[in-house]
Image: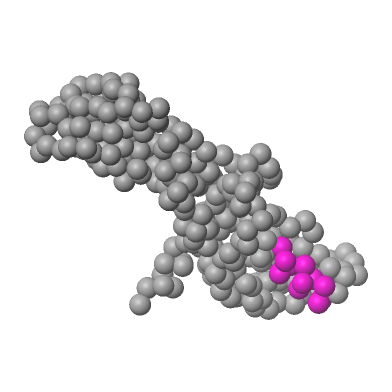
Amino acid sequence: MQEEDLTPTLRGAGRGIRKETALTIRPAYTAQDGWSVHEKSLYRELWDGGIEIGSQTRRSRIGTAELCKLTDLGETAVRKTLKSLLQKGDIEIVRAWESPIIPTTYKIYSDKRIMERRHSLGLLYREKKPGQREVLLLTAEEAFRRWEKGERFELREEHRNLPIPTRPKMNQQFLVVYEFANGSYSGYAPDLPGRISAGGTHEEMRKNLREAVENHLGLLVAQGNDVPSSVTHTVHCPEPIQESDVKHWIIEQLEIEVPVSSRTAQELASP
């Protein structure tokens, strides 16, 4: 049985379940990779309107009200976006004023200088969740920490040999049914539709079904889904009528080691 690869993928190594929309964390290779749409718009207005004071730096003197006009953003959005650019180290305030009318003096860094500053801080990854405007910058350690909590991300090439943390796991029992017919077993878990396996003996059947269920649950968590609950407690087993019918059934609770989803990890961590 082929095992699905659930470790963080490398750029260009798209395989199987690697859907673009499923990856919330990616490498930040350029300055733009770390910006939201608002940040990109505001930065460009500051840079284009700035005066060159060095090969990688410009200075711009502009008020919040003027930035609102240039970017077509409200005052609250402009202030929030400026704060985010300051926190990321992409701009600096040289002289500030509280009034939105009186210009504030900013130092704006070039794309190249921005990446140098981010690398010095270890901010190598970006995180943008579906439906959210904000783009966060993360260190490699923070990205791996999110991996442990169930998020999926794309590794930078230089990090491909780093040890990948193991997601927390817990044991959960599922009712499983083994049917013996035509000299072999087949098995399934009623609470996990489509999880079917086969084996020549009871032990082989149990091993194969456990592997199929664990791979399936690991894939669900990697895609951001929760592990299904075990709700089935009884199964109807009809009497065999024809020679090809099931000769006997074995019903048991199979203990499965499942990865902890992000929500469950938070619940486990709660006092």
Residue 175 appears in the picture as rendered: no
Query: For residue 208: magenta?
Result: yes
Residue 108 percent across, percent down from the top left: 32, 32
Relative side of 129 to 247, left or right:
left
> Quick one: which residue is furthest to the front in this view?
54
Residue in the picture at 41% in, 72% down: 269
Residue 254: which quarter of the image? Answer: bottom right
Residue 2: which quarter of the image? Answer: bottom right
Residue in the picture at 44% in, 73% down: 268
Q: Quadrant of the C terminus?
A: bottom left
Residue 23 percent across, percent down from the top left: 53, 45
Judge by depth and name the residue closer to the eye, 164 or 85: 85
Relative side of 188 to 82, left or right:
right
Residue in the picture at 46% in, 67% down: 264
Relative side of 6 to 238, left or right:
left
Look at the image and give the residue range highlighted in magenta: 202-212
Q: Quadrant of the N terminus?
A: bottom right
Residue 51 percent across, percent down from the top left: 28, 22
Query: For residue 162: magenta?
Result: no
In the image, residue 173 sits, relative to residue 138, either above or below, namely below
Residue 73 appears in the picture as rendered: yes
Residue 216 percent across, percent down from the top left: 65, 59
